[in-house]
Amino acid sequence: MPTHETIYTAFTTETVLLLGQMIKLARIQRGMSETDLAVRAGIARGVLQKIEKGNLDVPVGLFFQASTLVGLQLFETDDLERLQEHRSRIVGKIKAAQQDK
């Protein structure tokens, strides 16, 4: 079966590199070692190193997990209930947009 390589835009690549570096900075500022964060995230240290280097092959969920564990706020709120409310509003908007088509 042929495989194809995903080509990412320069903006996407830069965004993931930035996120990885932000995670690394937050980890260092909190006095956490790579091993500490990897254990807390339930991942191998090598995977954390890939995250911090902005490796696009790492699942996005692991980037979010690492961000959360170092206290890096990626959205306007870090309140779970508010995020869920916002997501619910977005789901409603998606349904409305689909009905309009």
Image (cartoon, grey):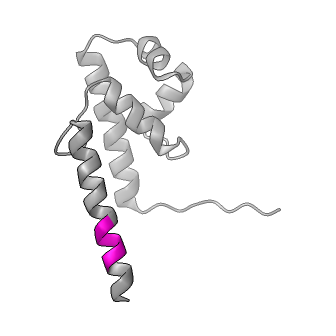
Q: Number of marks in the image?
A: 0
The stretch in magenta equals 92-96
SS assignment for the magenta stretch, majority: helix
Q: Is residue 53 visible?
A: no
94 inside magenta stretch: yes
- Quarter of the figure with the C terminus: bottom left
Query: Outermost residue toward the bottom?
Result: 101
Query: Outermost residue toward the right?
Result: 1
Q: Position of residue 94 (x, y in %)?
A: 34, 71
Q: Position of residue 67 (x, y in %)?
A: 33, 32
Name which residue lies at 49% across and 15% down.
39
Query: Outermost residue toward the left?
Result: 76
Along the line of sight, which residue is nearer the eye, 36 or 20?
Answer: 36
Instruction: Look at the picture and state if 25 lies above or below 6.
Output: above
Name which residue lies at 55% across and 45% down.
57
Instruction: Look at the picture and state if 10 lies above or below 27.
Output: below
Along the line of sight, which residue is nearer the eye, 62 or 79?
Answer: 79
87 inside magenta stretch: no
**Left or right: residue 83 compared with residue 14:** left
Q: Is residue 83 visible?
A: yes
Instruction: Look at the picture and state if 30 lies above or below 75.
Output: above
**Left or right: residue 44 compared with residue 82:** right
Name which residue lies at 83% across and 62% down.
1
**Left or right: residue 18 compared with residue 2:** left
Along the line of sight, which residue is nearer the eye, 72 or 1?
Answer: 72
Q: Which of the 4 image quadrants contains residue 66?
A: top left
Q: Which of the 4 image quadrants contains residue 22?
A: top left
Q: Position of residue 78 (x, y in %)?
A: 21, 36
Name which residue lies at 22% across and 36% down.
73
